[in-house]
């Protein structure tokens, strides 16, 4: 039997179209609202949503919880090191406090995602965006979370329209292997 389409090419086209669409939706929301709806950590989230949608890290649950943990850990780390009112490390330079905040935020994010059973690697970028002071105001962080929700809704709609059994919240647990003992 002859295959109709190369699966890798189809996945590449699907990922390309939805990567473009994801950022276009966020950019349109930014234009309409005047708020920055485009964040670096949304790129890898979109990639997971459309490249590996049925894996646990790409589930809506893990994306939302992961970014929420990352945002909270970043903010807590800024506060712990007295950096809530300092400019971003990109303009003010890297200080020992900023190093501490970045390290603490990534450590907290990693540990809390493990404890919550909600791994979502792009949340590591979210926590650094905040702990490095690129976003540091609560209203900016709230917009970031709204952007995560908008992107997640898009993933649900697009993946389901594509015929994938994409979850509304979390992926189905892996079937347990039969016990040989």
Image (cartoon, rainbow, N blue to C red):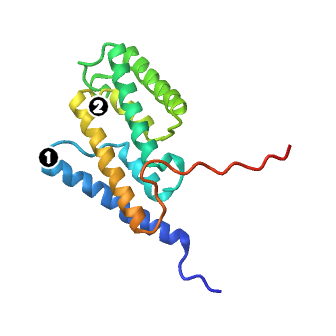
**Residue at label 2?**
134
Give me the C-alpha separation between circle 1 and circle 2. Answer: 20 Å
Residue 47 coordinates in the image, percent (x, y):
43, 54
Q: Quadrant of the C terminus?
A: top right
| Of pointers 1 and 2, the one earlier in the residue sequence | 1
Q: Position of residue 62 (x, y in %)?
A: 46, 42
Q: Are marks 1 and 2 in contact (CB under 8 Å)?
A: no
Give the class, few, some or many, for how many residues have Cα within 10 Å of label 1's Cα (few <14, many ≥20).
few
Q: Is residue 137 visible?
A: yes
Give the percent coordinates (x, y) of residue 180: 84, 47
Mark 1 = which residue? 33
Q: Is residue 7 left or right of residue 132?
A: right
Q: Is residue 70 above or below residue 61?
A: above
Name the quadrant of the N terminus. bottom right
Quadrant of the image occupied by residue 99: top left
Residue at left 46%, top 52%?
A: 48
Callout 2 crowding tier (Cα within 10 Å): few <14, some 14–19, many ≥20: some
- Near-viewer residue (169 or 55): 169
Q: Note whether 148 is above or below 154 in the view shown.
A: above
Q: Where residue 73 sits in the image (x, y, percent)?
A: 40, 25
Which type of secondary structure does the marked residue at label 1 adopt?
helix
Q: Which residue is rendered at x = 46% and y = 29% of the image?
A: 109
* Foreground tag (1 vs 2): 1
Q: Residue at x 38, y 42 (%)?
A: 41
Which residue occupies 32% across, 46% down? 149
Mark sitting on residue 109 = none
Give 91 or 85, whichever is nearer the viewer: 85
Question: Outermost residue, bottom direction?
Answer: 1
Question: Can the viewer see residue 44?
Answer: no
Local secondary structure at mark 2? loop
Residue furthest right in the image: 181
């Amino acid at each position: 039997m002859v295959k109709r389409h190369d699966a890798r090419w189809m996945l590449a086209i699907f990922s390309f179209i939805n990567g473009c669409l994801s950022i276009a939706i966020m950019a349109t929301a930014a234009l309409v609202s005047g708020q920055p709806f485009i964040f670096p950590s949304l790129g890898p989230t979109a990639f997971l949503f459309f490249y590996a949608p049925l894996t646990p890290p790409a589930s809506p649950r893990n994306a939302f919880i992961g970014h929420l943990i990352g945002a909270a850990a970043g903010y807590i780390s800024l506060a712990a090191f007295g950096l809530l009112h300092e400019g971003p490390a990109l303009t003010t330079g890297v200080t020992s406090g900023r190093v501490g905040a970045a390290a603490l935020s990534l450590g907290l994010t990693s540990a809390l995602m493990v404890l919550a059973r909600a791994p979502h690697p792009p949340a590591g970028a979210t926590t650094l965006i905040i702990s490095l002071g690129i976003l540091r105001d609560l209203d900016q962080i709230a917009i970031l979370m709204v952007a995560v929700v908008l992107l997640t809704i898009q993933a649900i709609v697009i993946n389901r329209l594509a015929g994938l059994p994409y979850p509304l919240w979390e992926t189905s647990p892996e079937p347990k292997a039969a016990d040989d003992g």
